[in-house]
Amino acid sequence: MPWFDRFDRLAAERLPDLEICREEPMDRHTTFRVGGPARRFVRPASAEACAALLALAESEGWPVLVMGNGSNLLVADGGADLLVIHTGHLDGAERVGERTIRAGAGLSLARVASFAQREGLRGLEFAHGIPGSLGGAVCMNAGAYGGEMKQVLSAVTAWMPGEGVRRLERETLALSYRRSVFSGGRGAVLAAELRLEPGDGEVIRAEMEELGRRRREKQPLEYPSAGSTFKRPEGHFAGALIEQCGLKGARAGGAQVSEKHAGFVINAGGATCSDVLALIAHIQETVFTRTGVRLEPEVKIVP
């Protein structure tokens, strides 16, 4: 019996309220707007339901991808033979102390930052324009404009293979540049606690608006993309290297190196995953040949 047939049966028996989509096109759920169908796509209604589903998947050996806003995913044109667990319903936020907020993994960083601003707490201004979810930001230690998640993260509630639901303190998360203990798909963040500083709400709002203005001015936000395509190589900036190699505007099908910011590969119209991968490979080869620097994709490629 194919795994997804058994999933359908067990989900109906044990998780009757689970929202299930079959052969769901992933171009609807990624900011690149590319990707074929996921075999099964589900949205658990709560952290408890999500943990129960992950435990069932582990016991059955089902292939799983946990995702939030899809802002750092590139899914193959032929689709993914996976159980995709979308955390969109894990979107609550609350203040749990004088300086701490707790939010669900599926809440967008923009909404987390806005919640903190309304509570008069500063420290998340850098995150307001990052188009991902809180869970994804923790997993890749997302950052921008001199800030990153490890500066504000205090603890997470996560489901871990063989262990179940655990509270993990920041020091145990192995947070480094675009990496954490969750890298490679190990475990899943359910919620996170962020320790911030008191601040003036209007000053915080003004700083977020200024960072937003800078993003709109410098980044191709008008096109679908996954943000920065490559990690920052040591001692260099990926965008500068790509521009130096004359690759601004380079295309493969509908994929293009942004004319505004060479660190972004964009969907200029009708791009496929194959187009994006071909352009990424061309950029990597050209930059290495001309500069000796190997660029590593920041975007997660789901085969």
Image (cartoon, helix red, strand yellow):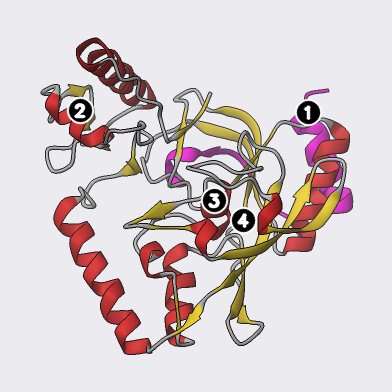
In x, y percent, where is residue 185? 65, 37
Looking at numbered disc 2 in the image, what kind of residue is underneath it? Ile
Q: Nearer the viewer, residue 76 or 143?
A: 143
The magenta region covers 1-29
Crowd tier of the residue under label 4, counting other residues whose Cα lies within 10 Å: few below 14, some 14–19, many 20 or above = many
Which label sits in the foreground, 4 or 1?
4
Q: Earlier in the sequence, mark 4 or mark 3?
A: 4
Looking at numbered disc 1 in the image, what kind of residue is underneath it? Trp
Crowd tier of the residue under label 1, counting other residues whose Cα lies within 10 Å: few below 14, some 14–19, many 20 or above = some
Q: Residue at x 49, y 87 (%)?
A: 119
Q: Which residue is mark 3?
A: 136
Q: CA distance from mark 4 to mark 3?
A: 10 Å
Q: Tell me the element at label 2.
A: helix
Q: Residue at x 14, y 57 (%)?
A: 217
Does the image show residue 245?
Answer: yes
Q: Is 20 within the magenta?
A: yes
Does the image show residue 269?
Answer: no
Crowd tier of the residue under label 2, counting other residues whose Cα lies within 10 Å: few below 14, some 14–19, many 20 or above = many
Q: Which residue is mark 4?
A: 87
